[in-house]
Amino acid sequence: MSKLGLWGLKKSPWVYHLAAAPCNNCDIEILELLTPRYDVERFGVVLVGSPRHADALLVTGVINRKSLPRVLEVYEQAAKPCLVICIGSCTCNTHIFRNSYNVVGPYDKHLPVHAYIPGCPPKPEAMILGVVKALSKL
Amino acid sequence: MAGRRIVPIGPYHPLQEEPEFFKLVVEGEKVVDIEIHIGYNHRGHEFISPELTYDQVPFLVERICGICSNSHPMAAVMAVEDICNLEIPERAKYLRTIVHELERIHSHLLWVGLAGHFIGYNTVWMWAWKYREHVLEVFEMLVGNRNHYAMNKPGGVRHDLRPEMVKPIRDAMDLVEKKVWMLTKAVLDDPVILSRLEGVGILTRAQALAYSTTGPTSRGSGVPWDVRRDEPHAAYGLVDWNVICFPEGDVLAKTKVRMLEMIESVKIIRQCLDRIPEGPIEARIEEVPPGEGCGRTEAPRGEVFHYMRSDGTNRPLRHKVRAPSYMNIASNKVACVGGTIADAALTLAAVDPCYCCTERMAAFEDGRLKYTWNELLKLSWQKTERVRARMGR
Amino acid sequence: MREAESKLRERFPEADYHRHNENRLYIRVPRERLTDACRFLHQERGMRLCICTGIDTREGFEVLYHFSDDDSGGLYTLKVVVPKDDPQVDSQAGWFPSTDWIEREMHELLGIDFPGHPDMQPLLTSDTDWNPDWKPLRRDYERRAEKHGR
Ligand code: SF4
């Protein structure tokens, strides 16, 4: 990766929130990050409305058969380089839904994943820590 | 027909926590038809559940939806208790009620915030979510997690209320009550917000009945049904509270129902804390006899219904889950039609849809997107601006 | 609750009644009488449909219609049993919109037919990656994940 690209990725990461088939809690906790208690915008983290603007994808939930093509398409659209950060046990290992007929496996089977943040749901603090760690790895 | 176009609303967007996919058929500004696609969140709970024991099932159904993560386990364990014809201890009843009402407060606050966001009042969003945090703190103290409470088990509850917890809960309730009144007044006194909500997305009483809607969606349409009152479970028959119901059927009525319900919830929690007796928190279930049972409870969005069939083993033979949004979202078909596109975002959100419960809607319409949800939100915001300019505010 | 039960017994003497407890009544009706019974409960008694449940049992497919009488707090469950080689239940969706989705769902997950349904498309399963012959809620469905190439 070029030095410039890296520098651009590290400062003020713009994140896009991608929910495949979650139970909603991870998603709420991500939104929670924006609200006054945690307010990640002070670190320059902005939730953007289009994957094309995103530096990092925050993914939640297991992938099921119907959402898999959509998830892949969102990843296609995201500008590379793009971090994929798995939030919640669902994304890391499909969690309690492992045996279901409609679940097609954890994220790392389908996308390159850069960070795992397990927990059900992870606490907002853990999410911030995870994103920071993923960025400092670069 | 000339001028008829299809507007897919849909894909992943940042602020409604879940993706959803509706196809609106519009003529000019008017919505004439709507198609609803779900299935993007189908994870097969009913398939996994028969593999788990009765003690494990609550953990599974908790993960149906993160917002109603007390309602689903509660209904599931009530179904088991119904099979056994078991009465749970008094203290467990009160504890269930407390957690259930706390959940209602946090869910309604969440909705109020998102509704504020949809009409372009982000301050409402930030405030509502800020005060929601206090409820989550209570949860963390009471059950050890901010969400997914793991409170219910067949026969009772898992976590006891320790005496030193009472005061923080009371403090949080005082704060929440004050702030809910403040929000209610701020929202209902603002003529711009009022004109955006009033008369929008009307669901008549007859339609509410035909679509079997539940919860605030039907109570905003003049159908005064509330499972907590109609089939008193937990401690709802033992405390004093009111069913909130407004006849108008528009988004304003649904907002008012939710606002006032939070006040009722605070009332219920206070009474529970006053009256909670000492005693055991669970009854032992030796075995679950063959048979069938139904459990239902009033989640923040409406009635949660669980049906369980037992064959005498320690796993359910069949477990059917019905979340309230399953019925409520279908009613969008009639509520949206006839309105304008700018109101559609708000109307669709007014049932407080929970796709995780219903399964899931979302899609990328192979590059043919005309409006994304964001643009739809922008339309909604522009309308608010127009109204504001017209009113000279 | 008791009054509604006696009305039901009058109207549907051929049905099989089982009272589980004060608030739960299970009524097994013959397949032909299902529509009448649903109409009676919803239109004449003003009850709300909670949901339908489809179950695969040894006897055949059971379809349960759970009706809630919100004024008295009772729950009435209509039960029809259809044989496995002829899984057909009349559709109610034409006159009762709340059964629309659930009939589609039972059709795709359990393979019960609802003749007369206006729009019998799959509701939940994937449009690209799903074999319409898979009926996951049937007892003979192969539960092991490897069978489905995952
Ligand atoms: S990890 Fe837990 S909280 Fe997150 S989506 Fe999965 S079940 Fe929900």
Image: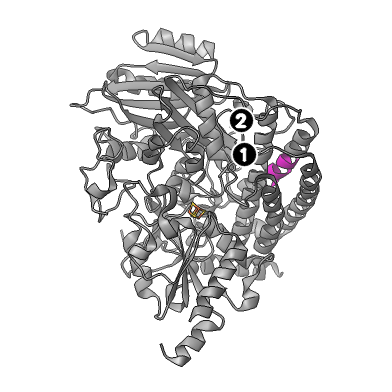
Q: In this rendering, does residue B218 appear at all?
A: no
Quarter residue A64 falls in: bottom left
Residue situated in front as seen by the camera: B328 or A101: A101
Considering only vertical position in the picture, is B367 above or below B240?
Answer: below
Kind of element beneath mark 1: loop
- Numbered tag placed on residue B247 in the rendering: 1
Mark carried by residue A38? none
Task: Say above or below: A21 vs B364.
Answer: above
Q: Can you see residue B324?
A: yes
Question: Mark 2 packing: few (<14 Cα in 10 Å), some, or many (20+)?
Answer: many
Q: Is residue B226 left or right of residue A58?
A: right
Q: Main secondary structure of the magenta part?
A: helix
Point out the stretch of residues depicted in magenta. Answer: B259-266
Chain name for mark 1: B
Cβ(mark 1) to ligand 1 < 8 Å? no
Assign the N terminus of chain B to one quadrant of the image.
bottom left
